[in-house]
Image (cartoon, rainbow, N blue to C red):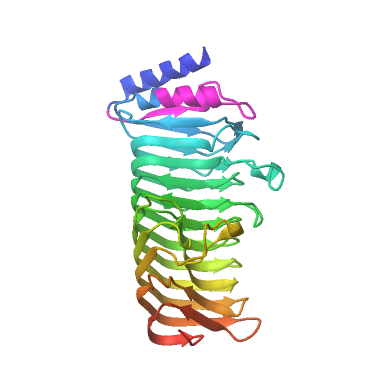
Amino acid sequence: MEIKLCSLIALLGFLTIANAQTVFDISKCGATPNSDITAILTKTWTDACASPTGATIVIPAGTYKCGVVEFKGPCKGPITFQVDGTLQAPTSPDGDSWITFCSFENLAVTGTGTFDGMGSAIYGKQKSKAVNLRFNFITNGHMEGVTSKDSKEFHVNVLGCKNLTISKFTVCAPADSPNTDGIHLGRSNGVQILDTKIGTGDDCISVGDGMEQLTVERVTCGPGHGISIGSLGQYAGEMPVKGIFVRNCTLVNTQNGVRIKSWPDQEANDVSDIHFEDIVLDNVDNPIIVDQMYCPSNLCKSKGASKVTISNVSFKNIRGTCKLPEAITMTCSSAHPCTNVEMCDIDIKCTTGPAKAVCTNVKPVITGIMNPPGC
């Protein structure tokens, strides 16, 4: 009865407010704090999706339990999903996803609320591959202001999207939370990540195959494993990565700084037009890395040369402190040496001794300050 009443209220609102978005407040649809709102939220999405003038779904202040849901389009108008409360995931969700937005144009996820993956209850105890938020095949999307907390795996996964902006977003998870990349992206075009703070147990931002025209600006990363391109070259059929711009970012107490990584002797791919500029490092283990012998947990089929080509890469105005002596490590493929690599105004000091640069199968063009020297 309450869900039907919510639909009626929304319909009346639509009939009386011409050319305005209908507002669906779940508290007026039967949702109460500390209850499971999965059914109400699913029905609300269906009603909102049918509104030709667009709709705003509001989750007000309070804590609500939510099961695995997929909010799927296409819809008749734009939708704003406004989260001002806290949504809590199931302890042991089925599948690899918690909340998914799929096949939709003109989506906004906004608010001051939190998507709580409840991963802290299982870290180190059991494996779960439930991603907090998936954006699959979204065109003209925007997420702003919300927080992802304690995801059981990636916090955000972006796949097949066009013109998506993520801004003023917060990721919060312990440094030892496993495989909890902040934002993972692949096979998308025209994505921006702006004014965002990420602290997690894996890469703050990881770029998978098929990513084109990605801009990352004013992102603070830490704790975490840094900002990474890859890993690539592990699977057959991977698509090239090109047009990645990382600017004005700060990395604090991270395992790595900025990194490109590919697997040895597995599959071919091409990485090009990659630019890291105006990066501040604060007590980072390994500030600049190109690793074409990436082999976590000894899972490589062989230790031969990587088949991934890397070209047109720049590192400019990267400065700060590192903990380990090898401030710069570039291990490029012996079969496909890195080409057109530029390093300009690098100033990294090691807090535990002299810093050094180690470069293999690459001859970068060096201009301006180069500290540590080498390469």
Viewer-closest of 246 and 237: 237
Query: What residue is rendered at 57% in x and 46% in y?
Result: 153
Residue at image position (55%, 21%) is 30
Q: Is residue 196 above or below residue 249?
A: above
Please report the residue visible at 30 percent of the width from the left and 28 percent of the height from the top: 76
In this view, 62 is above or below 234: above
Residue 315 place in picture, x, y as percent: 41, 74
Percent x, y of residue 21: 34, 31
How many marks on residues?
0
Q: Up-down: is 184 above or below 245? A: above
* Residue occupying the far right of the picture: 125
- Residue 335 pos. (x, y %): 39, 70
The answer to which image quadrant residue 53 occupies is: top left
Q: Quadrant of the C terminus?
A: bottom left
Residue 202 lies, in percent from the top left, at 57, 56
Q: Hey, which residue is sitting farthest top in the picture?
A: 1
Given the current orientation, which residue lies at the most extreme left position? 19
Front one among 317 and 184: 184
Q: Which residues are magenta?
A: 19-46
Q: Magenta includes 125?
A: no
| Residue 29 lies in the magenta stretch | yes
Q: Nearer the viewer, residue 334 or 212?
A: 334
